[in-house]
Amino acid sequence: MTKPLIVVTGASSGIGAATARLLSAQGHPLLLLARRSRRMEELALPRTLCRRVDVTDRGAVEAAVHEAQERFGPADAIINNAGAMLLGRIADQPVDEWDRMIDLNVKGVLYGTRAVLPGMLARGTGTIVNVSSIAGRKTFPDHGAYVATKFAVHALSENLREEVAARGVRVVTIAPGAVETELLSHTSDERIKSDYEAWKESAGGALDPQVVAEAIAYAYGQPQSVTIREIVLAATGQEA
Ligand code: NDP
């Protein structure tokens, strides 16, 4: 039987790219969304549509999902993974960094979800996977605005799960600890960045993104009657 379409946001690097490779190897057609289209095309995955989309642009997300569904049929899952971690102190972090994270980490997840959810509810099946963080469960130094966005992802995911559970749609929250990706590179405060690197090293290193991709695929791969509500995973040496 042919496998259904899966949408992966933030597929141009890190966890999203690893997840795209894995789900493609399992036989799924994919819609990959991110701003760097070349990086997605370089993955060279079969039956995959790569679209340069900023997920804070709701119309662009809707249009790309529509195009992919025309080609591959209904989306059975979305992996809302695109995100940014701009570390800083509430007292002096540039305010535009808050805006960027709130738009991307919170609204981006909502927009991705809305693009596929009505169809899933009509069909009585589907899976929404939201990539949050352990920073969506507890606080960390210099993470103020970031944890605010990730607590929001945890909260909206659980609320959505309750909203759609009886209609056959699954909602899964993935909460990783530190993962070795490009995520930290966008933080503008160099001291906070090097403190974070030192913290990661003291924990014996971060997770490989492949491990997170496998957790996502495990949750998705359960029978539709089973919802893995949340997976929390981190390097063994990560204490916090
Ligand atoms: P990366 O920085 O490697 O990947 C982030 C992805 O998001 C990229 O593909 C990037 O693509 C995409 N992205 C950023 N802004 C936008 C935008 N406006 N529109 C569309 N796509 C966008 O980091 P990770 O793989 O680590 O991050 C993936 C998720 O995992 C994030 O939600 C992050 O918060 C979460 N996470 C990561 C942890 C870690 O330690 N790495 C720990 C816990 C959670 P492009 O720039 O091409 O648009």
Image: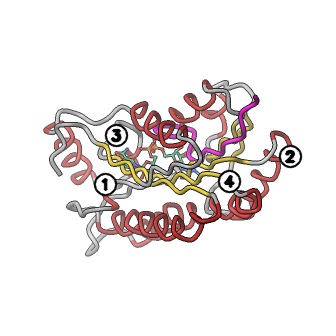
> Which mark sits nearer the N-terminus, 2 or 4?
2
Q: Which residue is mark 1?
A: 134
Give residue 134's position: percent from left, percent from top.
Answer: 31, 54
Would residue 101 appear left or right of 3 to someone viewing this image? left
User: SS of the residue at dot 1?
Assistant: helix
Amino acid type shown at disc 1: Ile
Would residue 179 appear left or right of 123 to someone viewing this image? left
Amino acid type shown at disc 3: Val
Q: Is mark 3 within 8 Å of ligand 1?
A: yes
Give residue 121's position: percent from left, percent from top.
Answer: 71, 62
Q: Is mark 1 within 8 Å of ligand 1?
A: yes
Give residue 93's position: percent from left, percent from top.
Answer: 32, 68
Amino acid type shown at disc 2: Glu
**Range of magenta residues:** 1-16
> Which mark sits nearer the N-terminus, 3 or 2?
2
The verdict on residue 12 being magenta is yes
**Mark 4, residues whose alpha carbon is within 10 Å: few (<14), some, or many (≥20)?**
many
Mark 1 and mark 4: Cα distance apart in space: 28 Å
Disc sitting over residue 179 in the figure: 3
